[in-house]
Image (tube, grey):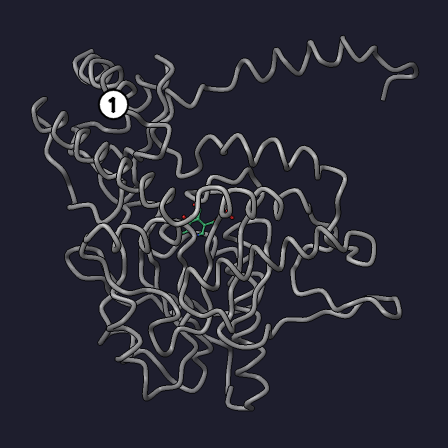
Amino acid sequence: MREAGLSASAVRTEIAAALSEDIPWTRVLNSICTEPHPLAVELSHAASHTNLGDVRIFRGTKRIERKAVALLLELLGHPQGAGSLVSGGTEANLLAMLAARQEARAAGRLTGRPEVIVGSTVHFSFDKIFSALGVTAVRVPVDDGLRLAPDSVAAAANENTIAAVATAGSSELGVVDPVDDIATALARHGVWLHVDAATGGFIIPFARELGRRLPQFDFHVDGVRSITIDPHKYGLANVPAGAILFRDQEAYQADSFFLDTPAHTTLLGTRPGSAAVATYAVLEHLGREGFVEITRTNFENTEYLTTQLTEAGYGLLIEPDLNIVVARVPHAAEVSRRLDADGWIVSTSKRFDEGLRLVVARHVTRDVIDAFMPALVKADHE
Ligand code: PLP
């Protein structure tokens, strides 16, 4: 550390220079996070001093968190449920697995190492979680559309199964597992069904309202015990804002050192109230109608991109459920590197040699697509 500090303006200059190296959103086609809503940025700044780890101090902020959780529970069909805002999808998934393991242990039915049933499309956050918790992942087949097959899930259940995970919108491919059929197949096994809707939670309810054929994925489905939903993705809040929701009481609680201090229900202790404020601000400001309109535009732009790709001679590797398009581009990894060198960020899935993955988040407008297409064609023909 410096002996004598720098002037504020010198620090500002250095930070501004670093930020200017970041890629502008208008050139980002790989991210399921997007530019946060201006109201979220404004109000989270106002709450930047708050800490939801100490709710005796930040009681007003805590009230906002409770209100945000209530709105999310209502959105996902179960106002009576419980939940917390957390740092993101990884923490939310971890808390769900902790709660499921705790319930299985309390029921005294584990005879060996705990197991969780997942498909190959499950988010990689679960790899971290399983190694942290000492859980074995039981990977079951997905179908041709890369969706988890309900019968395979049920066939894998045994006394050591603490949970099954269905994904409602994989970040890799935008595929939605048949949560309702999986719940039906699992019903007689009494297995905790966790739905990872980190990506799809703020898309599917509104897309269904627009008439898109997507499975019911939330607490309306009997058997769904917990859901991850991320305001910092399609919920337009700024990072870090995730949420874990439970059908029943929050199963994970950790006591603190101090008297008269409520138990923590999250992994993080000190945690940003600004995230709760940002989440609540966007939910209240946009309302259902606002989210439906954003979803409509995202799907229209996805169709526009698909048409542009087809006209340029690129097919799709998979029919998208959500606004993630995987175009068939030979030597996709090389094309992605060339695009990167030209200032465009896309991604390639390790699953396909020829798949260029393009995410149509809110910042990917028609203008962005019109600018991107010639860059893609150029990178492909270099
Ligand atoms: N689950 C899914 C389906 C995701 O798409 C993501 C992130 O992309 C995560 C979990 C992890 O979320 P986070 O990066 O917020 O921890």
Front residue (pair 352, 184) = 184
User: Percent position (x, y) of residue 88?
Assistant: 54, 49
119 with respect to 258 (left or right)? left
Residue beneath the point at 72% across and 69% down: 254
- Residue 157 vertical placement versus 195 (above, below): below
What element does badge 1 sit on? helix
Q: Quadrant of residue 374?
A: top left
Q: Quadrant of residue 325?
A: top left
User: Percent position (x, y) of residue 276?
Assistant: 61, 48
Residue at the extreme right: 3
Front residue (pair 65, 164) = 65
Residue beneath the point at 17% across and 29% down: 304
- Residue 136 vertical placement versus 289 (above, below): below
266 with respect to 212 (left or right)? right
User: Percent position (x, y) of residue 148?
Assistant: 26, 64
The crowding category of the residue bearing disc 1, from other C-alpha atoms within 10 Å (few below 14, some 14 to 19, many at least 20), is some
Residue at the extreme bottom: 108
Residue beneath the point at 38% across and 42% down: 290
User: Percent position (x, y) of residue 10?
Assistant: 76, 8
Residue of label 1: 366
- Which residue type does callout 1 highlight? Arg
The N terminus is located in which quarter?
Answer: top right
- Residue 204 vertical placement versus 154 (above, below): above
The C terminus is located in which quarter?
Answer: top left
Front residue (pair 317, 301) = 301
